[in-house]
Structure formats: C-alpha cells, structure tokens
Amino acid sequence: MGVSCAVIYPFKRKAGPPNWFVDGQPRRLKPMAFFDLAMGTGVVLLLLQTALVIYWAGYHAVWFFRRKF
C-alpha cells in the first residue's frame, strides 16, 4: 500500500487526461511521497525477513529432529 501511495501521491488528480507537466515544468515530488515509499519498502523488507526467519527455523528444526530420531 505504501508503494502505491508513493506512486500516485506526487501527481495531483485533475479532471481529464493525466498531465505530467504543468506550465512546461515537471511536477515536484511532495516530501510525503518519499515517506510513503520508505514505509512501503520497509514493510516489504520486514515481510522478507519474517519469511527468511521462518524458513531458517524450519530448516534447523528438521535437521535437529532427523539427527535426534
């Protein structure tokens, strides 16, 4: 969600087709967009870390019980 907010937020919605330039000037990114992007990246990294920890724990549990019994 954070990433999608970061992609959509910088460009104010107006009626009609999307216009990436206003008066010939590209629109500036709003500071909040960087925050949203950072939050989205953080959430993705947290999910990846959680998956790796679960995999690591499962791998060692299997190794331990195979060795023990």
Image (tube, rainbow, N blue to C red):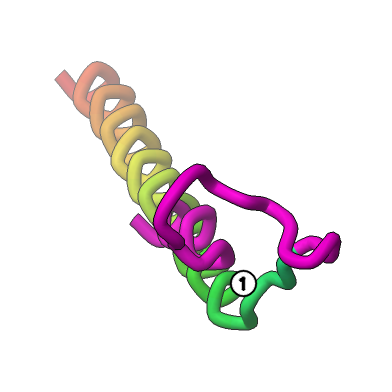
In the shown orientation, is residue 11 left or right of residue 48? right
Please tell me which residue is depicted at 84% across the width and 65% down the height of the picture: 25
Q: Position of residue 16 (x, y in %)?
A: 44, 48
The residue where tag 1 is placed is 34
- The amino acid type found where label 1 is placed reads Phe
Please tell me which residue is depicted at 39% across the width and 37% down the height of the picture: 56
Please tell me which residue is depicted at 79% across the width and 61% down the height of the picture: 26
Q: Position of residue 13 (x, y in %)?
A: 44, 62
Q: Nearer the viewer, residue 24 or 47?
A: 24
Q: Quadrant of residue 62?
A: top left
Q: Position of residue 19 (x, y in %)?
A: 62, 51
| Most distant residue in the left direction | 69
In the shown orientation, is residue 49 left or right of residue 58? right
Magenta stretch contains residue 19? yes
| Most distant residue in the bottom direction | 31
In the shown orientation, is residue 31 left or right of residue 53? right
Q: Which residues are magenta?
A: 1-26
Q: Nearer the viewer, residue 44 or 49?
A: 44
